[in-house]
Amino acid sequence: MSITLIVASKASPASYGALAVAAQVNMAKPQTVAVEYRDAANLEAEGAGKAAALIKYNGENYDTTNAIVRLLGRLVPESGLYNVTDPISSTLVDQWLDFAETKLATSDFKALDGSFKELNKYLTLRSYLVGYQPSLADFVVWGALKASPVFARVVKTKKESAGFYLARWYEYITSLDAAQLAVKDLQNVTKPAKATKGSKGSSDQGKFEIGLTEAEMGKVVTRFPPEPSGYLHIGHAKAALLNQYFAQTYKGKLIIRFDDTNPSKEKTEYEESIKEDLALIGVDSSIVTHTSDYFDQMYDLALKIIKEGNAYVDNTDQATMRDERMKGIPSKSRDLSVEENLRRFEEMKNATEFGQTCCLRAKISPDDPNGTLRDPVIYRCNLTPHHYTGDKWKIYPTYDFACPIVDSLEGVTHALRTNEYRDRNPQYDWMLKTLSLRHVTIWDFSRINFVYTLLSKRKLQWFVDQGIVGGWDDPRFPTVRGIRRRGMTIEALKQYILMQGASQNTLLLEWDKLWALNRKVIDPIAPRHTAVLSDKIVHVNVQGAPATPEVKETLKHKKNTELGTKKTTYSNKIVLDQEDAKTLEVGEEITLMDWGNAFVRNVAKNEAGEVTSVDLELYLEGDFKKTKKKLSWLSYGDEVAHVLLVDYDFLITKKKVEEGDSVEQLVTPVSEFKVPAVADANVKDLKKGDIIQFERKGFYILDEPATESAPAHFICVPDGKAASIGSKADTSAKKNEKGGKKK
């Protein structure tokens, strides 16, 4: 099937949506839509009248954006753009297409302002207009906005009118390949030889700056300040990617700053691992600093704050101090003289016996309703040598003191912080004002939380210490290394996090959408292979098959010929999975995938009802479209490779961990499942980290290549479907999903 989309170049902005849909269709089914550009007179001669685009199909003209995209969506259902099998989804798509046509195709600013607000409200908790992937609705509404000169003017002069959530969605759709292709095509066609007055509006559209207040193009500086006390997890990844996103959006810079103020927990190895993980997710770490670079300046500022009467050295024991802060009771040390505080602080610096009983506290308020302002600790003693400064210091600033100071000294303009720190924002501002330091704008966003998942480094360390997991890169861990090892692609991770945006909403997220997005990334490029579970394997005699094995070249991926071919062996001795063999009935016609049809002539079973052998008779002239059962199989001989298929459950049994829950009581008894299998010999050529699909079993990533003494280990990559990402801890039946068995 070949369809020609004719576009009027001079009216091209109105065709963004149609072109994006055409590009998306071609990604799903290459070379389906050919695009031709013609001037308006030629297009009118084709029967399009004053339309901006036209498709002539089966003698009919489709000359509106909505008619064109509906036609393409219906003709190519595999594009997933117009789910006609789901009447609710397709009706919602139609509703948004009408919205674009009736409410966005106007130059009335007041009317458009209302439409922007309606879209913004609707997109508050949504990544797409309909469902969980881009549809016709997303591309058409995006195209209408991009073509709107009013929208461009709002972006340029009063971007807050558009709305934050609309802006986030618009940026994301603009980043998709289909939208990028549409923009590129139109810019190439319409680019004038010489710029004319008023002509830059179209090319400027898409530079949709969102989110930050008090931001100037070229002057924004953000920072990502990880503590080098563990490995990056997916929550850190969100913070890092958002900081980079805003720095790039405003043509500014990103600083990676290691917050190394607690030598008891920090190690150089963690710092190196964080740099490696940032590189994995594509975050630039060319500018790296350390909080310890500023220890001298912070010490001087500590002396300043003491001398000005805004801090005091307290030797109250920890338990009493905690109780007094809870009750709003002033410390006995609160009104000490400046001289006594300086003397005590010197003892802290020298780590004398008395000095080690003290801490420096900011003198803000003993009983403020905001508990974080109740004279917080800003310096404490620690005799552990620092991994950079060695034994130079015996006192170290707390994060609450160090962070605003270093942000200001390093020129940070916007400090992105998760909204769990919101109560601490007044404390951050107090430090800057009291120390007479440059103002820094705080920008809050919600932390990322997932079901059945712990993000606390302390709790994750417990699993490592107990030997429940193999390390910080364990596939059950939410660390960047862990989810990468389980098959998460960086492309999917970045898309997902930027889809979340700098939202203020604290949500408990399911893993399904992230893994479903990952599936869309790997499905077109993952070679197809075959595996049969070794447990209760069924041997099959195939009448009419070659007695001497024959090897043929077959495609690794039927829809992606660029992946090349693999060797497939055909013989009269093959094997099937027990679960497939149990379904066979004598006399029925089945299909052997990538071979052809066959009749079942005999099925032998033992007393337990398990199949012991099967006899088939080839019937290659049969029609595979008429069979219900399409079975994966393997020729069984020297050509097979022995492998181990590994799957995982969540580490904990509770969907949402509450404060006070004991992690030890929530540990999933068995969370690793290993099943031996045989696979086609082509897998011997794979490299560690390669992602493939075992036909009818799912996607797998090669974790450990085979050795002389051990088979290759393949880890199952969740595909986002409920069965693959739900907790298996609830019922024993679930523990056997996808052939899983207890370790």
Image (tube, helix red, strand yellow):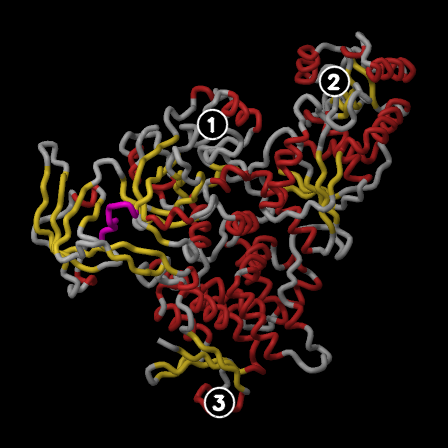
Which label's residue is closer to the chain start, 3 or 1?
3
Q: Amino acid at mark 3?
A: Glu
Q: Amino acid at mark 2?
A: Asn
- Is the residue marked by circle 1 packed among few (<14), some (14-19), or many (20+) residues within 10 Å? many
State which quadrant residue 267 falls in. top right
- Is the residue marked by circle 3 packed among few (<14), some (14-19), or many (20+) residues within 10 Å? some
* Residue ID at (33%, 56%): 567
Position in image of residue 13 (x %, y %)? 57, 75
Q: Which residue is mark 1?
A: 469
Count of residue discs: 3
Q: Amino acid at mark 1?
A: Val
Position in image of residue 518 (x %, y %)? 46, 49
Membership of 680 in magenta stretch = no
> For the N terminus, which image quadrant?
bottom left
Marks 3 and 1, Cα distance to the nearest angstrom?
68 Å
- Of all residues, the one furthest to the front in this rendering is 548
Question: In the figure, is residue 593 to the left or right of 322?
Answer: left
Q: Is residue 331 visible to the viewer in this orientation of the structure?
A: yes
> Compared to 185, does 136 lie above or below?
above
Mark nearer the viewer, 1 or 2: 1
Q: Which residue is mark 3?
A: 44
Q: Which residues are magenta?
A: 629-639
Which label's residue is closer to the chain start, 2 or 3?
3
Which label's residue is closer to the chain start, 1 or 2?
2
CB under 8 Å between discs 3 and 1: no
The foreground one among 713 and 548 is 548
Position in image of residue 490 (x %, y %)? 53, 48
Question: In the figure, is residue 288 to the left or right of 445?
Answer: right
* Residue ID at (39%, 71%): 72
Marks 1 and 2, Cα distance to the nearest angstrom?
31 Å
Mark nearer the viewer, 3 or 1: 1
> Compared to 24, does 193 lie above or below?
below
